[in-house]
Amino acid sequence: MVAIGVLVGLVSTAISPSQRAASWPFFGNKELDKSSDYVRDILQLVNENYVDPGAADYTKLTRSALKGMIDSLDPHSEFLEAGNYREVEEEMSGKFGGIGIRVEVKDKRIVVIAPIAGTPGERAGIQRGDEIQRIDDKPVTELDTVIEELRGAPKSQVTLTLFRPSTGATINATLTREIIKVESVRRGEQLLGKATGYLQITEFTGNTGEEFSRQLAALRDKGMTSLILDLRNNPGGLLDAAVKVAEPFFRNGELIVYTQGRKKEDREEYRATRKSDPISIPMVVLINAGSASAAEIVAGALKDTGRAVIVGERSFGKGSVQSVFKLKDGEGLRLTTALYFTPSGKSIHQKGIDPNVEVIMTPDEDTKLQIQRIRDDVKTADFEKRFGFAPIADRQLDAALDILGGIDAYSQRLTAR
């Protein structure tokens, strides 16, 4: 099962370790037989009569028909040719080539959801909300084209023409492709103030659960008494990874998230399986409009059960679930099969997670803070000279610290009584 998130250079997906093979029993179905015969007749008609026989090859026509059929369903279902299917498998491993931006189709526009931290896309200053209009001076209108053009050999270059709605500016950026290896959990060594842990998760990959557990344990060894979990600009990823991140804070057997398909029996529940007692400390989760899919699963579960205060902006609202079917010839099909729900039964799809404490950041602030978060070892003078701006305050993080400070002060007051 896949909870939709966003990829680099291709559509967004959150894929579980198990993929379904496409094998269906073919029982008699008059409607199916009638429709199949009709499609076959048209394929033959086009193949035998179209003026350009090369363009009317049966294989080409079939793949075009499959793409059109699946694309007509929703923006997240997709017929995956062999190359695209391999890219999905690369994404599952957390390692892929490209420029490090996550994109999505919105109203037939290719929109950047968020750049991945530490990648060419982020270093070039690409912002969430930017629209990709041209790649290497060729107009793009389809996601498949973006997938093809953004990926390439390491050290090769690609030029993007972007429109930035927030300023009305058109921007040209030339980027050098590189292998993108996502370090999904960052800053685990850091305590803020006396005993507040800080963990940033950039994406949910196959290693995220293990990385998170290790860094969480390290923070607890250092005396952590409260935690800030930063999911800003996290586009999602593996559904199982999201469950593993939430799990340490839930009792064994407690519901974290569930998915519901078209049939009542399609409900699938994801529950905590840890035998040890849950971690119970004051906690804040930071989200923004770039937090999607698996990130929303974690934020929604923690908010829904009262285990964390959510600070920031309403999340993206990517709550559909995809199944990936492996087809023959190395191809695949990604199909929307369900929606996911928080423990209390709330759907996030097209709604998002509302923060308990709203702190809105401008796109400019957001871009600057992304740079600061991965380069906070740069001295202030050098930082300003290199990046063209002085470090700014992270108002969302400051609000989180204020909230945790208030909880701590209140707890001490109760203890004193």
Image (cartoon, helix red, strand yellow):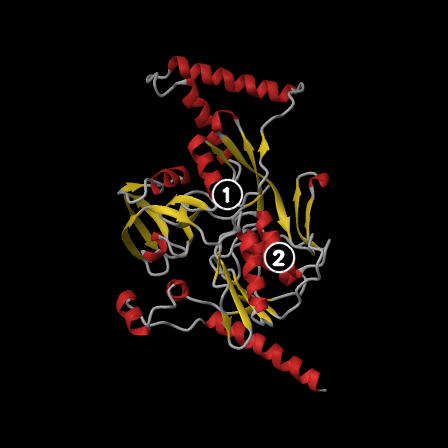
Q: Which numbered tag is attached to residue 92?
A: 1
Q: Classify residue 357 as left or right of residue 110.
A: right
Answer with the quarter of the image where residue 27 lies. top right
Q: Classify residue 229 as left or right of residue 97.
A: right
Residue at the front extreme?
221
Q: Classify residue 400 as left or right of residue 393.
A: right
Which structural element holds mark 1? helix
According to the picture, the residue beneath numbered tag 2 turns out to be: 246
Screen quadrant of the N terminus: top right
Please provide percent x and percent y for residue 337.
60, 39
**Is residue 242 visible to us here?**
yes
Please give the name of the residue rendered at 36% of the width and 41% of the height, measured from the top-left corner: 151
Of the residues shown, which amino acid type is indicated by label 1? Met
Please provide percent x and percent y for residue 399.
51, 74
Please give the name of the residue rendered at 49% of the width and 74% of the height, measured from the top-left corner: 398
Front in this rendered view, residue 340 or 253: 253
Q: Residues within 10 Å of mark 1 (few under 14, many from 20)?
A: many
Please provide percent x and percent y for residue 378.
34, 68
Residue at the bottom extreme?
417
Please give the name of the residue rendered at 72% of the width and 87% of the height, measured from the top-left corner: 417
Which structural element holds mark 2? helix
